[in-house]
Image (cartoon, coloured by chain):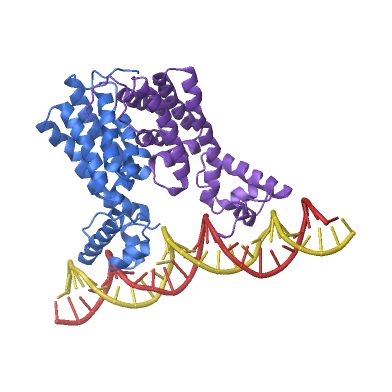
Chain colours: A purple, B blue, C red, D yellow
Amino acid sequence: MEVLLPASRPLRADARRNREALLSAARQAFLGGDTDAHVEDIARSAGVAVGTLYRHFETREALIEEVYRKEVDDLCAAPGVLLDQHTPEEALRRFLLLLVDHAAVGKGMSIVLESIMATDSPVFDDARARMADALSLLLEAGSAAGTVRDDVTGSTLLRALGGICGMRATEGWLVEARQITALLFDGLRHGAPQSL
Amino acid sequence: MEVLLPASRPLRADARRNREALLSAARQAFLGGDTDAHVEDIARSAGVAVGTLYRHFETREALIEEVYRKEVDDLCAAPGVLLDQHTPEEALRRFLLLLVDHAAVGKGMSIVLESIMATDSPVFDDARARMADALSLLLEAGSAAGTVRDDVTGSTLLRALGGICGMRATEGWLVEARQITALLFDGLRHGAPQSL
DNA sequence: CACGTAAACGGAGTCGGACTCACCTTATGG
DNA sequence: CCATAAGGTGAGTCCGACTCCGTTTACGTG
């Protein structure tokens, strides 16, 4: 663990190129499902040596985190868009399903979403907070419109969604995932019998 | 990875004693939250050497699995008892909460429950299947009584519960966990608005 | 109660994989 | 075109899971 490149002063051309290459190689490996790809292999397939990898990323974990940040960004931008186009209730429903579809894209993606949602790993603190905010936005819009319960927080719902992403690779998992999502959605709607 | 002790012929007295000691030491470590306790340490605190540990357990993972099997057994026995004492709907509600409380007992326990519920690790295939069966029992009783949806399987619900156990150690997590559980329960009850 | 022997034990050693560091290479601004 | 700081390299370190074989011990038998 060594002093990293300072974020100040723009990167030298070759450094930026290598950084891209590393991220792209890692992306390919992780999204492809090889979640315990070796750093040596990632470095080699990016055409650099491990030392270079460690010049750009504190640890193997940090590299993984970086790879997935963009995916999470996309996801977090969705609620705003959905709320513009639909009722809060429908926006919520669509966002939950969007999450499921995202998890379907690649084994790696679902593992990460799971990590974000279902663990306390400090690596994902940031992503977790942003996802919780995204969900809060939807829940608040819904409860303001009176169609969604107002006693559930974004972070609560986030946790509840965690299990969904662990389902990858099970026979017919997409069907199950959508079902769980619907289950949660129904529990969230105003008018459900409340046991709380 | 070496040929293990054959299960035939009862263990020699000292071997059985050491096996118990190892399980007990591992239990203490894992349930106490140190989920990446080193095999060396576990062996030492059991008063044996690593070689002995590996004579009894194929891998570190196998040892962990063994430690938690008993916990899972207890949990899986609960639905039968609950169904004797309560309506199916109430039995289901209580079982879900029991799961939460179990996760509350120790950090290690919740990590394992999470592993069982939210991953595909073959290590937990058996435990996962038994948990799913336990949940199916409850769901079927409920749908037979007409108070619970009949379109949700035990394994679906199991997945949905996975996220709950990832919440350990968050401020006020028990409250959140109970809330998610209630959310799911409400979605499961017959009479909820169904979006499926 | 020896004593033979199969069972069990110990722990130094191997192996694999993440991470480091001392030295070499090269982009870049003056 | 040169100086120099930024960047790259990869053999080597470290650490932890797992193995191997020489030693010790439980226990059935004469």
Left or right for B111, reference A30: left
Q: Which is more toward the observer, A31 or A64?
A: A64
Q: How many marks?
A: 0
Q: Which residue is drawn at 21% across and 28% down?
A: A195
Quadrant in which the C terminus of chain A appears: top left
Left or right for A121, reference B31: right
Q: Position of residue B113 (x, y in %)?
A: 30, 43
In this rendering, is residue C1 above or below B121? Answer: below
Q: Position of residue A124 (x, y in %)?
A: 46, 44
In this rendering, is residue A116 above or below B155? Answer: below
Left or right for B92, reference B58: left
Q: Which residue is drawn at 34% across and 46% down?
A: B170
Res D2 quadrant in image: bottom right
Q: Position of residue A113 (x, y in %)?
A: 45, 37
| Residue A190 visible in the shown view | yes
Q: Which is more toward the observer, B51 or A31?
A: A31
Residue furthest out toward the front: A144
| Residue B72 visible in the shown view | no
Q: Position of residue A192 (x, y in %)?
A: 27, 21
Q: Which is more toward the observer, A127 or B63?
A: A127
Residue furthest out toward the left: B85
Quadrant in which the N terminus of chain A appears: bottom right
Q: Residue at x 51, y 23 (%)?
A: A81
